[in-house]
Image (cartoon, rainbow, N blue to C red):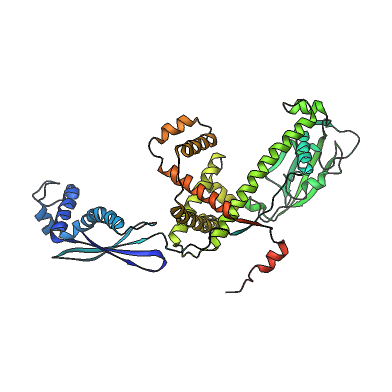
Amino acid sequence: MASSIEKKEHSQVIISLEAGKEEFDKALKASYNKNKGRFQVPGFRKGKVPYQLVCQYYGEGVLYEDAINELANAQYPEAVKEHDLQVVSRPMMDVQSIDENGVKYTIEVYVKPEFELGQYEGVEVPFEDAQVADKDVEDEIERMRKRNASLEEVEGRAAQEGDTVTIDYEGFKDGVAFEGGKGEDYNLKLGSHSFIPGFEEQVAGHNAGEEFTIEVKFPEDYHAEDLKGADATFNVKIKMIKCENLPELDDEFAKDVSEFDTLDELKADIRAKREEAVAKSNKQAFENETVRAVCDNCEIDIPDVMVDNEVEQMANDQAMRMQQQGIGLDMYLQYIGQSMDDFKEGFKPMARVRVKSSLVIEKITEKLDPEVTDEDIDAEIAEIAKSYSMDAEEVKKSLGDSTEFLKDSIKAKKTVEYLTSKAVKVAPKPADEEKAEEPEKTEE
């Protein structure tokens, strides 16, 4: 097999391939055997027309497409291996010539871009060591109080923010009741902003038993087309007002909401868990900033196809997460008034960052070649098992001997750990200084 490559701009590669007459004839015969069941010639049963007669009756060209595909299926992988190409796109074939000497054709692909690494050891990385403040603990205690609050009916005063009111209501546009605008015995917490702007504010100040009318304006981006930006009135009746009764903050409260006997023990546990979460967050943020700084030191001409592939993956992941929550992507896009193309376009900036990071980490990993032990693999499997609520042995059994992708993942993690161990922590720049350094936008 003869093959050659031509490297072009933006990581495009043209692979030139050819097959001599004997090899092409063999491929034509294979194409004939594959398709002979669809050829019909008078005097012959379907599927029984001889090869030569098919060529005479239909023309030899009827066999070319499958014949060349047959050749490409064998020659293309060999050429990729021979020239050590890391292909990132679907191959696109173009036939150059077919004559008495055989066939010549090209296959166009995009490959991972070639680039030089910049500085990756000792990069300066902004780091802010976030700490758990007393207020963080108190806020969590307060949230626990509210989750365990009871509702008590209010008498002798008007509804106010924070109260839960039981109401009947009916909405009208231009004096006509509209669909979905009516409710009975509806429990509405004032200040929750669960109704359209202005509704809850106008309910506040009224007493139980009162009937009144309020005027509102629907938002311009409201999901119902006929109500977008529309003025409307609501007839409202307050049937009951309830307020939160928060439990006392004492040891009894701690016993009721946790496994601890005292409030001090509960607070200590909250602080410990918060400190662990903050430490993890600080570590993750520092790793992310380190990788970003290392990537900023590289210039890479990334093929659009790599970004597009990442966008597809991100969009599919988002659709799957929404599906798990019972939300269909099509319905969601219809609700927010966005097309699929616009939805995917929003992923492009992050997709480009991800692709660049992946390329840079991969190249540094090749240079460092970190060792992966059996203990590393077991730890990775345990992590996977934990995230999917599975047994580690069950995960190991499902993987079988397919652990190469695990090794690649572990190596990448070790590379990031190495980079962060070499990075230099510096104080973050003030927000106004960062803003001053941003390049001015110019009109195109």
| Relative vertical location of residue 62 with respect to residue 246 in this rendering, above or below | below
Compared to residue 252, the image places residue 406 above or below, namely below
Is 111 situated left or right of 131 in this image? left
Q: Quadrant of the C terminus?
A: bottom right
Comparing 433 with 200, the one in front is 433
Residue 163 visible in image:
yes
Res 21 → quadrant: bottom left
Closer-to-camera residue (272/399):
272
- Does any portion of residue 38 appear in the rendered image? no
Question: Does residue 215 appear left or right of residue 312 in this picture?
Answer: right
Against 193, residue 78 (above or below) is below
Figure label count: 0
Please provide percent x and percent y for residue 102: 16, 63
* Location of residue 376 in the rendering, given as x and y in whole percent from the top left corner: 48, 39
Of the pair 312 and 232, the residue shown nearer to us: 312
Quadrant where the image shows the N terminus: bottom left
Task: List the single residue furthest toward the right.
Answer: 156
Question: What is the quadrant of residue 186 in the picture?
Answer: top right
Q: Residue at x 47, y 58 (%)?
A: 307
Q: Position of residue 116 (x, y in %)?
A: 46, 64
Of residues 266 and 246, the one drawn nearer to the viewer in this rendering: 266
Residue 82 left/right relative to 139: left
- Residue at the left extreme of this rendering: 43
Residue 33 position in % (x across, y down): 16, 48
